[in-house]
Each structure stands twice: as C-alpha cells, then as structure tokens.
Amino acid sequence: MFKHKFKADGTLERHKTRWVLRSFTHRPGIDFDETFSPVVKAATVRTVVSLALSRSWPIHQLDVKNAFLHGNLSETVYCSQPTGFEDPAYPGYVCKLNRSLYGLK
C-alpha cells in the first residue's frame, strides 16, 4: 500500500508504504468473517480505570504503535511477493510469514 503524506499547505511531505496482505483464500460462509482485532473495548477501559480508582492504584497511559505487527503466528502462512518487489529469477515463489502483517485474518 502506497500513500502520500502532505503538509498543511498541501505540499508533499513524504511517501509512506506498508505491506498489506490480500485475502484470496477466504471462502464466504466458511472462514471469510474470521478476524482478530487487537483493540480494547471502551467498557473494559472504564472498568479497569474504575477499579484502579477505587483501590488507589497509579494509572499510566502509553501508546504502542504497530504492536500487533510483531505477533507470532500459530499457523503457517504464505503470501505472494509484493508488487514491485518480485524476484525475476523466481517469479513463482511466495513469501513465508514469520510475523503478522496488516490485513492478515
């Protein structure tokens, strides 16, 4: 996935890219809707904050960007070579994922 980031005045700031997987093997009605989203629900946050307040626990906030990208995979996953980065000597080869990537269901 390629993106352009612009400054407030509309000039180009930088180019961004990330490797996003495309799901070609998911079958509607079988495994198409199976996804995992590592996002906490607001009700869970409220419960934990309420519990910490009632017990006088200190609360700290932090943000871990892209933390889910480093998750281990429990199954073997292969994907096609990224567009623009295909190896001409091995055009039919695929990539074996060792860690999670965007778009992985």
Image (cartoon, rainbow, N blue to C red):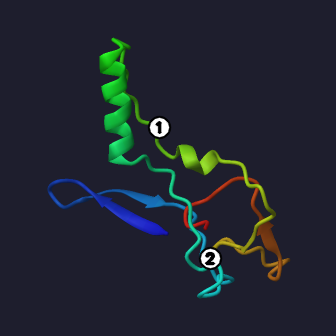
Q: CA distance from mark 1 to mark 2?
A: 29 Å
Tag 1–tag 2 contact (CB < 8 Å): no
Residue that appears at 64% across and 78% down: 31
Q: Which residue is mark 1?
A: 64
Q: Which residue is mark 2?
A: 83
Vertical arrangement, residue 96 with respect to residue 60, above or below? below
At label 1, counting other C-alpha atoms closer than 10 Å, the crowd grade (few under 14, some 14-19, many 20 or more) is few
Q: Amino acid at mark 1?
A: Val
The one of 18 and 26 positioned closer to us in this rendering: 26
Q: Quadrant of residue 27?
A: bottom right
At label 2, counting other C-alpha atoms closer than 10 Å, the crowd grade (few under 14, some 14-19, many 20 or more) is few
Residue sticking out furthest to the bottom: 28
Q: Quadrant of residue 91?
A: bottom right
Vertical arrangement, residue 100 with respect to residue 4, above or below? above
Q: Secondary structure at mark 1?
A: loop
Which is in the foreground here, disc 1 or disc 2?
1
Q: Position of residue 75 (x, y in %)?
A: 79, 61
